[in-house]
Image: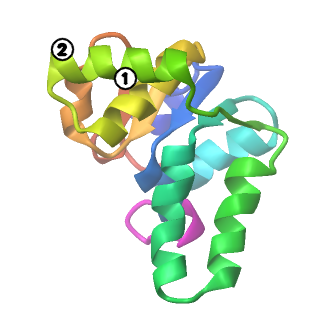
Amino acid sequence: MKLSERLQSVTRLFLDTAPVIYFVEQNPRYVEQTRVVFNLVDDGTLLAVTSPVTLAECLTLPYRLQRPDAAHAFVELLAADENVRFVPIDEQVADKAAELRARYGLALPDSFQIAVAILSDCDAFLTNDLALKRVTEINAIVLDEMDAE
């Protein structure tokens, strides 16, 4: 199935870390798929939702490589774009993350990500982590399962 078709019924999409990195770094394997997503975000068709976990994971390599320009690109995309909602982690998110972690055996960062998505009323969770499809509370869209446009 094409990613654009899969996103037709989605108005609020959580962005996991990998798709964001693929887009910013223009990963050749995923450039077409991520471009579809970010074009929909740019034109206001999709509201993207993300969390401090996504931002922190995206910033790690640029900081390690001492690339402030790359770090700035991630901050601009995730925390300064009017069509991206940056949701902080609070007590309610922590509680939901613990519940999800207990139920599914998720890693803590994944639990936080999915908790933010659920509590932010996201229609879907864009990732490239096939293991997250086992979470039944949200519709996980895995890039590797989607056809390029």
Tell me where residue 52 sits by quadrant: top right
Does the magenta-highlighted stretch encompass residue 111? no
Number of residues whose C-alpha sits closer than 10 Å to that of mark 1, classed few (under 14), some (14–19) or many (20 or more)? many
The span from disc 1 to disc 2 (Cα, nearest Å) is 10 Å
Q: Residue at x 60, y 18 (%)?
A: 120
Q: Amino acid at mark 2?
A: Arg
Residue placed most toward the observer, 54 or 43: 54
Q: Position of residue 38 (x, y in %)?
A: 66, 48
Q: Are marks 1 and 2 in contact (CB under 8 Å)?
A: no
From the image, tell me which residue sits under label 1: 97
Q: Residues within 10 Å of mark 2 (few under 14, many from 20)?
A: few
Image-based side of 74 in relation to 138, left or right: right
Which is nearer the eye, 52 or 135? 52
Q: Is residue 25 magenta?
A: yes
Q: Secondary structure at mark 1?
A: helix
The residue depicted at 55 percent of the width and 61 percent of the height is: 23
The structure residue drawn at horizontal position 41% and vertical position 26%, both measured from the top left corner, is: 114
**Residue type at mark 1?**
Ala
Q: Residue furthest front?
A: 91
From the viewer's side, name the closer residue of 30 and 138: 138
Task: Identify which residue is drawn at 23% across, 38% down.
Answer: 107
At which x and y percent is residue 99?
29, 14
Q: Which residue is mark 2?
A: 103
Q: Which residues lie in the magenta part?
A: 23-31
Residue 31 is marked as none
Residue at disc 2, secondary structure = helix
Give the percent coordinates (x, y) of residue 131: 18, 35
Q: Nearer the viewer, residue 80 or 6?
A: 80
Q: How is the image coloured?
A: rainbow
In the picture provided, is 69 more to the left or to the right than 146? right
